Amino acid sequence: MPDAPGGLTRVERLLPVLERLAGTRLRLRRQGEVAAPAGSVRLEPIPEIEGLWLEFANGGPGKPLTPGASPGLAPELAQIVGSLLSAERDAVQVAAELSDRYEEIDLIYTISEILGHTIRLDEAADRILREVSTVVGARRATLLVHDAEQQVLRIVAARGMGAQDAEPIEVDDACSVAARVFREMRIVSYDPTDPTAPNPGCPEGRNYRGQAFLSVPVLYAAPGARGKPIGVINLTDREGGDAFTAGDRKLVAAIANQIGAAIENARLVARDLGQQRVLRELELARDLQLKLLPSPGVLAGRVDVAARCRQAESVGGDFYNLLNLRADRIGVMIGDVTSHGFSAALIMALVMAASGIHAESAETPTEVLRRLEASLADELASTEMFLTVFYAVVDPKAGRITFANAGHAHAFFVSTRTGRAVRLEATRPPLGLATAAGEDAALTWAPREAIICLFTDGVAEALGGGGGGGGGGRDERFGEERVLGHVARLKDRSAREILESVHADLAGFTGGAPPADDRTVVILKV
């Protein structure tokens, strides 16, 4: 039995059945084989199989195969044999193609497994590049990822070369193939055996002739969005041949899409982890900063005092200090650094560290502020910031307050007999704004007949929420009068009750909106 496309073993098993149907012996004959004597056989071409016939052993042309047989039986049998041979041929071809593509299919599966078990690109990049370059037969390969801040392509993995030795590639580099592939978002390949192939590099300088290479963009497209380039895969020095095939290009492009999604996911995870880390650090900084502020309990038994500081951000520039001084005196300080956030928080921390030292060693409040300004000179100059500070030394037994005020507007003395408020005016400019010594100011009162009320801009300038229910309009400010009104109305109550009343009114006035500026209030009854 002669060979035919797809093999004939199954046809051989079918032929006895067909012979019984036809009532004659059957065989397959190829073109060019020795023919049987004329008139002793009938040859019927097999459809779809060129050069192959079905031979019937008796019955000449135009004669039935067996008495009573249909004249169309021979073509029908040939059609059956042809369909079977065609199916076997197609099956063999599919099996061969699957066998040829097994490595590629396995590669895509392997890379999916790699990317599915890691969220860090640097852990997967080297292995991915090794797998890809092995399948397409590239001795050298690189994976580059776009650095959006620096606008360069950085190598994150390499094979056949040291990644640490490669310089980043500028995205707008006109001579770099990788940069061009990234910009144009299309594949560039080069076959040095093709004399008509243009040099994709620069005519002078870097010249890529002599080695085939394949450069594929790594793209990422969010659902419903246009794809964007995020990197490039370069493959060169092909083993066993000079040119990468169309199949290689399709395979690497498919893998590049997988890598693109992985890179974007890794970036999102890293960004999320980074944001969580920043939030934790901000919370820690806030806790540390609040711990710098003293508890009113440090003056317990000497005066009735309440204080609260609420920052606009995690950290801020408002501060206060409460000090036990010699001769049963008390030191009270409040300050407001321009702006808020980390720069203001740094100045605030420095003030808290230095104010206690200077309050102990300086003779007057004015001298305390002068020394404090000298301590902060470098930081205030480098940050271009300044701060308002009110500092007073209170002698409860003598009924006397001596103070220095470096531009802090919201400092008041309130009489517990009349409820009348007196502003404790500025005695010098804010620290860091202009150098001026100034001088102390003083007030006296009868014992237990005074309240010192101190607060910052964030309280007086808080804007109304505009939501009704007793709250202020959107352009209305809380103002000094509201604060002083609570002090006057509750002058016979504890400092704590006065403070709570101010903050409750402030919350209702603003509609509970987050503060735009730090808010600090200190109430001291003496």
Image (cartoon, rainbow, N blue to C red):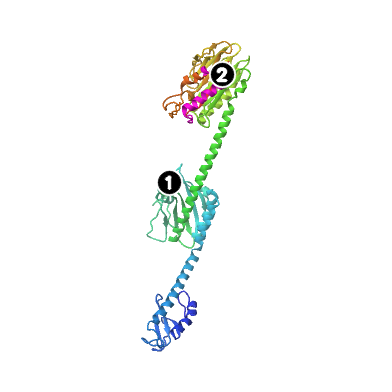
Front disc: 1 or 2: 2
| Frontmost residue, 236 versus 118 | 118
Examine the rendering and report whether any part of residue 160 can be seen.
no
Q: Are marks 1 and 2 in contact (CB under 8 Å)?
A: no
> What amino acid is labelled 1 in the image?
Val
Local SS, label 2: loop
User: How many labels sit on residues?
Assistant: 2
Instruction: Report the magenta residues as a range.
Output: 487-515
Q: Position of residue 194 (x, y in %)?
A: 40, 61
Split into 4 quadrants, where in the image is the C terminus? top right
Residue 281's image quarter? top right
Image point (59%, 11%), residue name: 398
Q: CA separation, marks 1 and 2?
A: 69 Å
Q: Position of residue 326 (x, y in %)?
A: 63, 16
Q: Position of residue 61 (x, y in %)?
A: 37, 86
In the image, residue 478 above or below residue 217: above
> What amino acid is labelled 2 in the image?
Arg
Q: Is residue 443 left or right of residue 60?
A: right
Q: Which mark is residue 171?
A: 1
Q: Position of residue 180 (x, y in %)?
A: 41, 50
Q: Residue furthest front?
A: 469
In the image, residue 152 above or below residue 136: above
The residue carrying pointer 2 sits among few (fewer than 14), some (14 to 19) or many (20 or more) residues within 10 Å by Cα, namely: few
Q: Along the polypeptide, which appears first: circle 1 or circle 2?
A: 1
Examine the rendering and report whether any part of residue 36 can be seen.
yes
> What residue does disc 2 label?
493
In the image, residue 271 above or below residue 23: above
Local SS, label 1: loop
| Frontmost residue, 144 versus 396 | 396
Q: Is residue 73 left or right of residue 158?
A: left
